[in-house]
Amino acid sequence: MIEKTIWDQERKAMQDIHRELTGGDLDAWNYRMYEPVSATGTLSPEGSEKFTNYKDKWEKAHHYVESNEDRMLSRCWNNLPESSPLRIAGTDQFYLMWTRQTRNRQALVSIDAACEIIHSIILADHFNETGFEPKSERFGVYKEHVAWLMRGAEPHYVENWSRDYVKCKNNARNSDQILLEIISVYDVLSANCIDDDWTQIPNATSIRDYICDQNNERSDDPQLLSDVFWEEKMRAASMFIPLIY
C-alpha cells in the first residue's frame, strides 16, 4: 500500500467545489481570511519593508499549520485498512470530511493538543461537548466507520482504534484550557481586525495581553507571569493557527 503524504490535489478539489457553489474562494473557511494585505502605494519604504517581513513570517506560520494538518491526515489515512469505508470512499471524501476547514478545530485541540493520536481527527467531534451534528454527512460517515468496526474489522486495527479512543477520552476530561483560550482569542481578535490593517492581526503578544486582561483575578498566578509558560503554549497553538511568536 502506497503511503500518502501530500494533500494538495484534494485541497484544490475542495476549493474548486466551493468556488463552483458560491462563486468565491475558500478564504472564509481557512486562515487566508486573515492574510496580511496592504493597499498599493500607501506605505512608506520603511513601512513597506516591515510589511514584507511580517507577511513572510505569516506565510511560514500558515504553512506550518497546513503541513501539520497534512501530517495528521496522512497518518490517519495510511493506517486505514483497505476494507475501511473511509478508505473506500477515496481521498477527496476523506479530506472533505476531516480537514480543519470544515470543522471546529477546538474539538481537536481538546483531545489531541500535541497532534500525536492517529485517529484524533476522526474522534474529535465524538468527544466534543456538542458532539456531531446529527444530520451532518460527517456523522453519517463516522457511524458507517464504527459499524464496520463492530462487524469485525482487522484485529490489529481495532486494537489501534480502541487505544486511540481511550487516549482521546482521557484527554477530553483534562483538556488544556489555556491553549483552547488562545485559539478562541485568536478568532475574536481576528474578527475585529480593521480591513487592510495588517498590524491588527493577532500575534502571541496581543493574545497573551488579552487573556491576562480577562483574568484579573489571576493576575498573581505564577503561570500567567511566566514567559516560558506562554512560549510553550504559543508553540503548541501554532500547530492550529498561523501564529507569529
Image (cartoon, grey):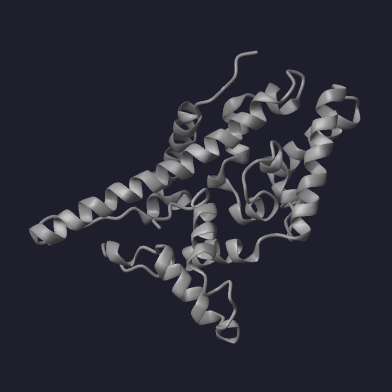
Q: How many numbered circles does the render carry?
A: 0
Residue drawn where x is 45% and y is 37% of the image: 15
Residue drawn where x is 73% and y is 36% of the image: 141
Residue drawn where x is 53% and y is 61% of the image: 183
Please, which residue is most extreme toward the right here? 151
Please, which residue is most extreme toward the bottom here? 217
> Quadrant location of residue 217?
bottom right
Q: Nearer the viewer, residue 127 or 180?
A: 180
Q: Is residue 196 above or below residue 14?
A: below
Q: Nearer the viewer, residue 144 or 64?
A: 64
Quadrant assignment for the N terminus: top right
Q: Is residue 164 above or below residue 174?
A: above
> Quadrant location of residue 190?
bottom left
Q: Nearer the viewer, residue 125 or 19?
A: 125
Q: Position of residue 142 (x, y in %)?
A: 75, 39
Position of residue 112 in the picture relative to residue 202 (left or right): right
Quadrant assignment for the C terminus: bottom left
Q: Position of residue 237 (x, y in %)?
A: 53, 55
Position of residue 136 in the picture relative to residue 164 (left or right): left
Q: Is residue 33 above or below residue 15?
A: below
Residue 137 visible in this rendered orientation of the protein: no
Q: Position of residue 80 (x, y in %)?
A: 72, 25
Q: Position of residue 203 (x, y in %)?
A: 40, 62
Residue 179 visible in this rendered orientation of the protein: yes
Position of residue 89 in the picture relative to residue 244 (left or right): right
Residue drawn where x is 22% and y is 56% of the image: 51
Please, which residue is most extreme toward the top here? 1
Q: Is residue 19 above or below residue 244?
A: above
